[in-house]
Amino acid sequence: MRRARWIAAAAALLLSACATAVPAPVWTGGPGGAARWTAGEAEVRPVGLGIPGGAALAQGVRFAGGVELVLATDSPLHSLSDLKLVDGDDFVSVSDAGDLVRGRLRHDAAGRLTGVEGLRWRRLTLEDGSPIADKADGDAEGLFLLAGGRIIAVAFERRHRLWAYGLETAGAPEPLASPDADFPLNSGMEGGAAAAGGWRVTGESGGVWDCAAAGCRVVVAPPAEPLPDSEYRITGLDRDPGGDGFWVVERRFRAPVDVRARVRRMAADGTLGPVLVELSLPSTVDNFEGVAAVRRGDGTRLYILSDDNGRSQQRTLLLAFDVRPAPTP
Protein backbone atom coordinates (compact mmCIF):
# COMPACT_ATOMS: atom_id res chain seq x y z
CA MET A 1 0.00 0.00 0.00
CA ARG A 2 2.81 2.40 0.88
CA ARG A 3 4.62 1.57 -2.37
CA ALA A 4 1.47 2.31 -4.36
CA ARG A 5 1.12 5.64 -2.56
CA TRP A 6 4.71 6.56 -3.40
CA ILE A 7 4.18 5.61 -7.06
CA ALA A 8 1.03 7.72 -7.25
CA ALA A 9 2.76 10.68 -5.61
CA ALA A 10 5.73 10.40 -7.96
CA ALA A 11 3.39 10.28 -10.94
CA ALA A 12 1.60 13.42 -9.77
CA LEU A 13 4.88 15.28 -9.43
CA LEU A 14 6.01 14.04 -12.85
CA LEU A 15 2.83 15.26 -14.51
CA SER A 16 3.22 18.66 -12.85
CA ALA A 17 6.88 18.88 -13.88
CA CYS A 18 5.91 18.19 -17.50
CA ALA A 19 3.70 21.28 -17.62
CA THR A 20 5.43 24.25 -19.21
CA ALA A 21 6.72 26.99 -16.89
CA VAL A 22 6.64 30.48 -18.39
CA PRO A 23 8.20 33.69 -17.04
CA ALA A 24 5.85 35.85 -14.99
CA PRO A 25 5.59 39.43 -16.31
CA VAL A 26 8.16 41.45 -14.38
CA TRP A 27 7.33 44.54 -12.34
CA THR A 28 8.65 47.65 -14.03
CA GLY A 29 7.91 50.19 -11.35
CA GLY A 30 4.90 52.32 -10.60
CA PRO A 31 3.39 54.76 -8.13
CA GLY A 32 4.27 54.33 -4.49
CA GLY A 33 5.41 56.18 -1.45
CA ALA A 34 8.80 56.06 0.19
CA ALA A 35 8.88 52.25 0.21
CA ARG A 36 11.58 50.91 -2.07
CA TRP A 37 10.60 47.77 -3.93
CA THR A 38 12.87 45.45 -5.91
CA ALA A 39 11.49 43.46 -8.84
CA GLY A 40 11.41 39.71 -8.29
CA GLU A 41 11.59 37.14 -11.07
CA ALA A 42 9.69 33.86 -11.20
CA GLU A 43 8.34 31.35 -13.66
CA VAL A 44 4.78 30.13 -13.37
CA ARG A 45 3.64 26.56 -14.01
CA PRO A 46 -0.05 25.57 -14.07
CA VAL A 47 -1.09 22.87 -11.61
CA GLY A 48 -4.29 20.97 -11.09
CA LEU A 49 -5.46 18.92 -8.14
CA GLY A 50 -3.34 16.00 -9.32
CA ILE A 51 -4.23 12.34 -9.33
CA PRO A 52 -7.73 11.66 -7.94
CA GLY A 53 -7.88 10.12 -4.52
CA GLY A 54 -6.28 12.73 -2.33
CA ALA A 55 -8.46 15.78 -2.94
CA ALA A 56 -11.92 15.97 -1.40
CA LEU A 57 -14.16 18.98 -2.06
CA ALA A 58 -17.44 19.41 -0.23
CA GLN A 59 -20.67 20.07 -2.06
CA GLY A 60 -20.71 23.65 -3.31
CA VAL A 61 -16.90 23.90 -3.60
CA ARG A 62 -15.19 24.11 -7.00
CA PHE A 63 -11.49 24.12 -7.87
CA ALA A 64 -10.75 27.37 -9.75
CA GLY A 65 -7.18 26.89 -10.96
CA GLY A 66 -3.70 26.69 -9.52
CA VAL A 67 -0.11 27.64 -10.21
CA GLU A 68 3.37 26.84 -8.95
CA LEU A 69 5.98 29.57 -8.63
CA VAL A 70 9.25 28.20 -10.01
CA LEU A 71 12.07 30.14 -8.37
CA ALA A 72 15.84 30.39 -8.60
CA THR A 73 17.71 28.94 -5.64
CA ASP A 74 18.71 32.37 -4.35
CA SER A 75 15.35 34.05 -4.98
CA PRO A 76 13.95 36.20 -2.14
CA LEU A 77 10.49 34.89 -3.08
CA HIS A 78 10.95 31.57 -1.31
CA SER A 79 9.28 30.71 2.02
CA LEU A 80 6.06 32.69 1.54
CA SER A 81 4.00 32.18 4.68
CA ASP A 82 0.75 34.07 4.12
CA LEU A 83 -1.09 36.31 1.68
CA LYS A 84 -3.95 38.78 1.63
CA LEU A 85 -5.69 40.64 -1.19
CA VAL A 86 -5.14 44.39 -1.15
CA ASP A 87 -7.45 45.56 -3.91
CA GLY A 88 -9.01 43.41 -6.58
CA ASP A 89 -6.31 41.02 -7.75
CA ASP A 90 -3.37 42.78 -6.06
CA PHE A 91 -1.93 40.76 -3.22
CA VAL A 92 0.63 41.11 -0.46
CA SER A 93 2.59 38.24 1.06
CA VAL A 94 5.26 37.80 3.69
CA SER A 95 8.14 35.37 3.99
CA ASP A 96 9.60 33.68 7.04
CA ALA A 97 12.94 35.26 6.08
CA GLY A 98 11.57 38.75 6.82
CA ASP A 99 10.54 40.00 3.36
CA LEU A 100 7.34 41.67 2.23
CA VAL A 101 6.21 40.64 -1.26
CA ARG A 102 3.64 42.17 -3.58
CA GLY A 103 2.18 41.02 -6.88
CA ARG A 104 -0.97 40.64 -8.92
CA LEU A 105 -3.04 37.55 -9.69
CA ARG A 106 -3.86 36.67 -13.29
CA HIS A 107 -7.05 34.93 -14.43
CA ASP A 108 -8.49 33.68 -17.70
CA ALA A 109 -11.79 34.78 -19.21
CA ALA A 110 -13.64 32.27 -17.03
CA GLY A 111 -12.07 33.67 -13.87
CA ARG A 112 -9.76 30.72 -13.22
CA LEU A 113 -6.34 31.43 -11.68
CA THR A 114 -3.64 31.21 -14.35
CA GLY A 115 -0.62 33.07 -12.99
CA VAL A 116 0.89 36.06 -11.23
CA GLU A 117 2.66 39.20 -12.41
CA GLY A 118 4.47 42.26 -11.09
CA LEU A 119 6.27 40.47 -8.26
CA ARG A 120 8.40 42.72 -6.06
CA TRP A 121 9.82 42.62 -2.57
CA ARG A 122 11.32 44.71 0.19
CA ARG A 123 12.91 43.92 3.53
CA LEU A 124 10.92 44.40 6.71
CA THR A 125 12.56 46.49 9.42
CA LEU A 126 13.33 46.44 13.13
CA GLU A 127 12.23 49.00 15.73
CA ASP A 128 15.05 51.36 14.77
CA GLY A 129 14.17 51.24 11.07
CA SER A 130 17.13 49.06 10.08
CA PRO A 131 16.50 46.06 7.79
CA ILE A 132 15.96 42.71 9.46
CA ALA A 133 19.12 40.66 9.12
CA ASP A 134 18.61 37.69 11.45
CA LYS A 135 16.23 34.72 11.00
CA ALA A 136 15.22 34.97 14.66
CA ASP A 137 14.02 38.52 14.01
CA GLY A 138 12.48 37.91 10.60
CA ASP A 139 10.43 34.73 10.97
CA ALA A 140 7.18 36.30 9.73
CA GLU A 141 4.32 33.80 9.61
CA GLY A 142 1.08 35.74 9.26
CA LEU A 143 -0.28 39.06 8.07
CA PHE A 144 -3.49 41.04 7.73
CA LEU A 145 -4.52 44.50 6.56
CA LEU A 146 -5.79 47.44 8.61
CA ALA A 147 -6.85 51.04 7.86
CA GLY A 148 -8.35 50.18 4.49
CA GLY A 149 -5.23 48.36 3.36
CA ARG A 150 -2.77 51.17 4.15
CA ILE A 151 -1.36 49.29 7.16
CA ILE A 152 -0.11 45.73 7.16
CA ALA A 153 0.14 43.82 10.43
CA VAL A 154 2.81 41.11 10.50
CA ALA A 155 2.96 38.29 13.04
CA PHE A 156 6.42 36.95 13.88
CA GLU A 157 7.44 33.82 15.74
CA ARG A 158 10.65 32.90 17.57
CA ARG A 159 10.56 36.49 18.87
CA HIS A 160 6.78 36.46 19.17
CA ARG A 161 5.28 39.84 18.35
CA LEU A 162 2.77 41.65 16.12
CA TRP A 163 4.05 44.73 14.29
CA ALA A 164 2.32 47.21 11.98
CA TYR A 165 4.03 48.57 8.85
CA GLY A 166 2.93 51.02 6.18
CA LEU A 167 2.22 49.09 3.01
CA GLU A 168 3.73 51.76 0.77
CA THR A 169 5.70 53.80 3.28
CA ALA A 170 9.13 53.15 4.73
CA GLY A 171 9.97 53.39 8.40
CA ALA A 172 10.04 51.59 11.71
CA PRO A 173 7.10 49.38 12.72
CA GLU A 174 4.58 50.12 15.45
CA PRO A 175 3.79 47.37 17.98
CA LEU A 176 0.22 46.06 18.10
CA ALA A 177 -1.53 44.31 20.97
CA SER A 178 -0.95 40.55 20.86
CA PRO A 179 -1.91 37.65 23.13
CA ASP A 180 -0.14 37.27 26.45
CA ALA A 181 0.54 33.60 25.75
CA ASP A 182 3.46 31.26 26.21
CA PHE A 183 3.90 30.27 22.57
CA PRO A 184 6.43 27.55 21.69
CA LEU A 185 9.53 28.88 19.93
CA ASN A 186 8.51 27.82 16.41
CA SER A 187 4.71 27.76 16.82
CA GLY A 188 3.45 31.28 17.31
CA MET A 189 0.72 33.44 15.76
CA GLU A 190 0.31 31.75 12.38
CA GLY A 191 -3.13 33.15 11.58
CA GLY A 192 -4.29 36.76 11.58
CA ALA A 193 -7.26 38.67 10.17
CA ALA A 194 -8.96 42.03 10.55
CA ALA A 195 -12.10 41.77 12.67
CA ALA A 196 -14.85 44.03 13.94
CA GLY A 197 -13.21 46.55 16.24
CA GLY A 198 -9.70 45.12 15.83
CA TRP A 199 -8.13 41.83 14.74
CA ARG A 200 -8.20 38.09 15.43
CA VAL A 201 -5.12 35.90 15.79
CA THR A 202 -4.73 32.14 16.10
CA GLY A 203 -1.86 30.16 17.57
CA GLU A 204 -0.41 27.33 15.51
CA SER A 205 -0.31 25.11 18.60
CA GLY A 206 -3.81 26.20 19.64
CA GLY A 207 -5.80 29.18 20.91
CA VAL A 208 -7.86 32.00 19.38
CA TRP A 209 -7.80 35.64 20.52
CA ASP A 210 -9.65 38.82 19.58
CA CYS A 211 -7.53 41.94 20.00
CA ALA A 212 -7.85 45.71 19.87
CA ALA A 213 -5.57 48.58 20.81
CA ALA A 214 -6.39 48.08 24.50
CA GLY A 215 -5.40 44.40 24.54
CA CYS A 216 -6.61 40.88 23.73
CA ARG A 217 -9.31 38.58 25.04
CA VAL A 218 -9.38 34.81 24.80
CA VAL A 219 -11.96 33.39 22.41
CA VAL A 220 -10.73 29.79 22.54
CA ALA A 221 -8.21 28.95 25.23
CA PRO A 222 -5.05 27.17 24.06
CA PRO A 223 -4.83 23.53 25.15
CA ALA A 224 -2.81 22.54 28.21
CA GLU A 225 -0.46 20.65 25.88
CA PRO A 226 0.40 22.44 22.60
CA LEU A 227 -0.96 20.72 19.51
CA PRO A 228 1.83 18.77 17.79
CA ASP A 229 2.63 19.08 14.09
CA SER A 230 1.29 15.55 13.62
CA GLU A 231 -2.24 16.89 14.24
CA TYR A 232 -4.17 19.47 12.26
CA ARG A 233 -3.18 22.99 13.29
CA ILE A 234 -4.39 26.35 12.01
CA THR A 235 -1.72 27.92 9.81
CA GLY A 236 -3.70 30.68 8.10
CA LEU A 237 -6.75 32.87 8.73
CA ASP A 238 -8.79 35.47 6.84
CA ARG A 239 -12.07 37.19 7.48
CA ASP A 240 -15.13 35.84 5.67
CA PRO A 241 -16.18 38.66 3.31
CA GLY A 242 -19.71 37.28 3.26
CA GLY A 243 -20.38 37.12 7.00
CA ASP A 244 -19.12 37.59 10.53
CA GLY A 245 -16.90 34.50 10.56
CA PHE A 246 -13.49 33.57 9.20
CA TRP A 247 -11.79 31.11 6.86
CA VAL A 248 -8.92 28.95 8.07
CA VAL A 249 -6.37 26.67 6.45
CA GLU A 250 -5.02 23.81 8.55
CA ARG A 251 -1.96 21.64 8.03
CA ARG A 252 -0.87 18.24 9.34
CA PHE A 253 2.46 16.46 8.86
CA ARG A 254 3.40 12.93 9.84
CA ALA A 255 6.86 11.73 8.85
CA PRO A 256 8.13 10.79 6.43
CA VAL A 257 5.77 12.07 3.70
CA ASP A 258 2.20 12.31 4.99
CA VAL A 259 1.44 16.02 4.60
CA ARG A 260 -2.18 17.17 4.47
CA ALA A 261 -4.12 20.41 4.35
CA ARG A 262 -7.73 21.37 4.73
CA VAL A 263 -9.95 24.45 4.64
CA ARG A 264 -12.78 25.18 7.05
CA ARG A 265 -14.89 28.07 8.22
CA MET A 266 -14.53 29.48 11.74
CA ALA A 267 -17.52 31.05 13.48
CA ALA A 268 -17.25 34.25 15.50
CA ASP A 269 -17.08 32.18 18.70
CA GLY A 270 -14.10 30.21 17.37
CA THR A 271 -16.04 27.06 16.52
CA LEU A 272 -14.77 25.29 13.41
CA GLY A 273 -17.23 24.12 10.77
CA PRO A 274 -17.08 21.06 8.50
CA VAL A 275 -14.12 20.45 6.23
CA LEU A 276 -14.76 22.00 2.82
CA VAL A 277 -11.43 21.25 1.12
CA GLU A 278 -9.07 18.43 2.05
CA LEU A 279 -5.79 17.77 0.23
CA SER A 280 -3.43 14.82 0.63
CA LEU A 281 -1.25 12.57 -1.49
CA PRO A 282 -1.50 11.44 -4.25
CA SER A 283 -3.18 14.73 -5.15
CA THR A 284 -1.58 18.18 -5.13
CA VAL A 285 -0.51 19.12 -1.60
CA ASP A 286 2.34 20.87 0.18
CA ASN A 287 2.98 22.98 3.26
CA PHE A 288 -0.10 25.24 3.03
CA GLU A 289 0.12 28.19 5.42
CA GLY A 290 -1.67 31.14 3.82
CA VAL A 291 -5.29 31.90 2.94
CA ALA A 292 -7.05 34.90 1.39
CA ALA A 293 -10.79 35.31 0.88
CA VAL A 294 -12.66 37.67 -1.42
CA ARG A 295 -16.32 38.06 -2.37
CA ARG A 296 -17.13 36.61 -5.81
CA GLY A 297 -20.71 36.81 -7.01
CA ASP A 298 -22.89 35.40 -4.27
CA GLY A 299 -20.07 33.18 -2.99
CA THR A 300 -16.45 33.38 -1.86
CA ARG A 301 -13.19 32.90 -3.75
CA LEU A 302 -10.44 31.39 -1.60
CA TYR A 303 -6.72 31.33 -2.39
CA ILE A 304 -4.38 29.10 -0.40
CA LEU A 305 -0.58 29.41 -0.47
CA SER A 306 2.14 26.91 0.44
CA ASP A 307 5.51 27.71 2.03
CA ASP A 308 8.37 25.86 0.34
CA ASN A 309 10.74 26.59 3.26
CA GLY A 310 13.42 27.33 0.67
CA ARG A 311 13.78 23.58 -0.02
CA SER A 312 14.09 22.06 -3.47
CA GLN A 313 11.81 19.15 -2.54
CA GLN A 314 8.95 21.50 -1.67
CA ARG A 315 6.92 23.85 -3.84
CA THR A 316 5.34 27.29 -3.68
CA LEU A 317 1.76 26.55 -4.72
CA LEU A 318 -1.18 28.90 -5.07
CA LEU A 319 -4.58 27.23 -5.46
CA ALA A 320 -8.01 28.83 -5.92
CA PHE A 321 -11.40 27.51 -4.83
CA ASP A 322 -14.91 28.92 -5.20
CA VAL A 323 -17.35 28.29 -2.36
CA ARG A 324 -21.04 28.79 -2.94
CA PRO A 325 -23.21 29.80 0.02
CA ALA A 326 -25.00 26.96 1.77
CA PRO A 327 -28.63 26.61 0.64
CA THR A 328 -31.23 28.05 2.98
CA PRO A 329 -33.21 25.26 4.67
Image (cartoon, rainbow, N blue to C red):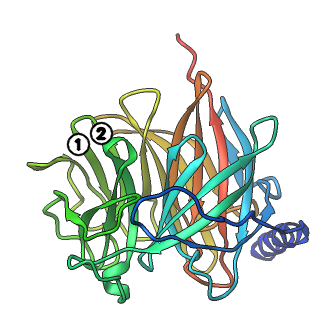
Kind of residue at disc 2: Ala
Q: Are marks 2 and 1 in contact (CB under 8 Å)?
A: yes
Q: Is residue 76 visible?
A: yes
Q: Is 57 located above or below residue 69 in the figure?
A: above
Q: Nearer the viewer, residue 230 or 11?
A: 11
**How many neighbours does mark 2 have within 10 angstroms: few (below 14), some (14-19), or many (20 or more)?**
many
Residue at which label 1 appears: 198
Residue 74: x, y in percent? 62, 88
Instruction: Give the quadrant of residue 131.
Output: bottom left
Q: Is residue 243 above or below residue 121?
A: above
Amino acid of disc 1? Gly
Q: List the single residue furthest toward the left.
A: 214
Local crowd size for mark 1, using a 10 Å CA cut-off: few (<14), some (14–19), many (≥20): some
Q: Nearer the viewer, residue 83 or 6?
A: 83
Residue at 58% across, 77% down: 78
Q: In the displayed structure, does residue 157 sit left or right of residue 76? A: left
Q: Give residue 246's position: percent from left, percent from top.
A: 40, 39
Quadrant for the N terminus, please: bottom right
Write the residue at 32% across / 70% down. 156
Q: Along the horizontal axis of the image, is 170 left or right of 47?
A: left
Question: Of helix, strand and loop, which one carries label 2?
Answer: strand
**Outermost residue, top direction?**
329
Q: Position of residue 230 (x, y in %)?
A: 47, 70
Residue matched to label 2: 195
